[in-house]
Image (tube, rainbow, N blue to C red):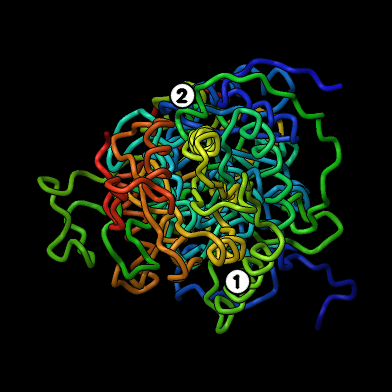
Amino acid sequence: MPPKNPRKLYRRPAALADVPMHYCVGCGHSLIHKVLAEVLDELAIADRTIGVAPVGCAVFAYNYLNCDMSEAAHGRTPAVATGIKRARPDSIVFSYQGDGDLAAIGLAETLHAANRGENITVIFINNTVYGMTGGQMAPTTLIGQKTATSPHGRFAETMGYPLRMCELIDTLVRPHYIERVALDGPRNVLRAKRALTLAFQAQMNGRGYSFVEILSACPTYFRLSPLDSLKFVGKEMADYFPARLFRNNGESVHA
Amino acid sequence: MSSRVLMTGNDAAAEGAIRAGCRCYFGYPITPQNELIAYMAKHMPDRGRVFIQSESELAAISMVYGSAATGIRAMTSSSSPGISLKQEGISYLAAARLPSVIVNVQRGGPGLGGIEPSQGDYFQAVKGGGHGDYHMIVLAPDSVQEMHDLTAEAFDLADRYRTPVMVLADGRIGQMMEPIRLREEQREFPAKPWALTGARNRKPRIVRSLFVEEGALEKLNRELQAQYRLIEREEVRFEELLTSDCSVLVAAWGTCARVAKSAIRKARAAGLAAGLLRPITVWPFPTQRLAQLAETVKAILVVEMNSGQMLEDVRLAVNGRVPVHFQGFLGSRIPSETEILTAIRNLSPASAPGRRKPRKSHAPQKPA
């Protein structure tokens, strides 16, 4: 028997377009899009938000989010976001970047936008591989992890260690909010949503640069099942990239 | 009456942009355009506008991309090696059809080259420069006044055709001072119904250059090409001097055209029928006018501070109707009046016997 006065407890966020997504089974992007759309709805900012999605699996984010969006050349995403925000300071501006975009080709743009304290929100999806181009090594690929361009695993001696971006950005003075979350289960999905909410609120209040790193699964190029991929995120990835708050209100938070 | 002031070309370009309503400037230092970025650093914040010294030219042009996407007027400036870095962003601006202005105060190349004036970036500017099948409007000033005016007008052209526009100057025009008349401040700007302003009471808008749906990229490229044909019909600009009866036509742009003007006046005083065609838009190129002139002149002399780049466009326009000679200067050296006058004299039909004609080959003449 259905209740007499049914109450709708869950609905598709208005900021999320009602279309099928192209992402692989178990990919973190679709979940993060949904959480992001919920945050835009709850803060009632979707109609003044401009997002920037660069090259990568999420370049088509503009098909899924009901807000104005721009593409960016690979890695130049924080520069494009800077240009938008400086031209329209009343807009809410976010970038949505993968590990190659943010930590390899766009490392200079990433650090300088953070160092200037641009009043933007950077959402960093770290899944340790280049997805769109076929699973090549990323700057965040773990030691020993096999990819198309590290077929025998990543060796520190020739390829260096994975870059910890939250820790790197935490060395700068201007950033206001920095947090890393691991998207490995319902509890941490809620943590990711909370982190995004705090990041956007910081921007809405004109407090400056906010950075949310989300450890996310890529079952296709982890070559694991979706379930085992979540375990990889929560164990191997989170061991090297500790999921925690690094900076709040402009102050470093010690582990 | 507008005021008359003494300015460098770089300052004049900056002030022209400001008076054209440029809201955001992004740049990275490089000689010989440093006066421009310094002028912007001083004057943009004073007027409540945006100035950022970016971390690189790659970042600067992408900041222009972001600002232009919101519908405001934005620009960057640099010199040759820096312009190479901006090619990535220029290709994206062309594809995303974002109006924007890029000033190139050329120096010698290739590589780090030198810091003296040069015209070595002609190919890069007029043939596209970055990857893909695109053009941008390229304006070539030959005076400080034109640095001011053309930089301002570049913004109107950019808005009209939704395209990046380049002002292609050189270190000499950038650094020299001349008295100029300042333009009035522009106060009215065209509406931009495609700009990203937040999707309030309307559907979301997308600024993009990736087109993977079947047929979408071809559609974009057809639209771009149609726009380029329109620009070729509507926006060709050039200056002519004493062409109605000339037998030797000098074709030169920018600094070389300026020296050529003096040489031509001296040639006329000496009884030689010389004239000048100076493209002001080097893209779109004044192909038709050059073809017309080729019907009446006896010889064409192309003078450039490179190894013969506009020369190729002149030859395409002339299409064998008349001999095309070339005088090139490669070491970032500006031609002298006498050198061009000598070349005109040697090509003139009435030239005295025993005078050597400039070589017809592609290779530059050795400096005197």
SS at mark 2 in the image: strand
Q: Position of residue B286 (x, y in %)?
A: 59, 59
Quarter of image, res B74: top right
* Residue at mark 2: A252
Chain ID of residue with mark 1:
B
Between B366 and A238, the residue placed more toward the observer is B366
Dot label at residue B225: 1
Question: Is the residue marked by circle 2 packed among few (<14), some (14-19), or many (20+) residues within 10 Å?
Answer: some
The amino acid beneath tag 1 is: Gln
Q: Which residue lies most toward the left here?
A: A157
Which residue is drawn at the image coordinates 83% and 52% (left, top)?
A: B191
In the image, taking residue A5 as reference, residue A191 lies left or right, namely left
Residue B118 image position (x, y, % from top left): 39, 37
Eyeballing the image, is B330 above or below B285? Answer: above
Give, as a three-letter code, the residue at label 2.
Ser
Residue depicted at 47% across the width and 34% down the height: B170
Furthest toward the right, the residue is A5
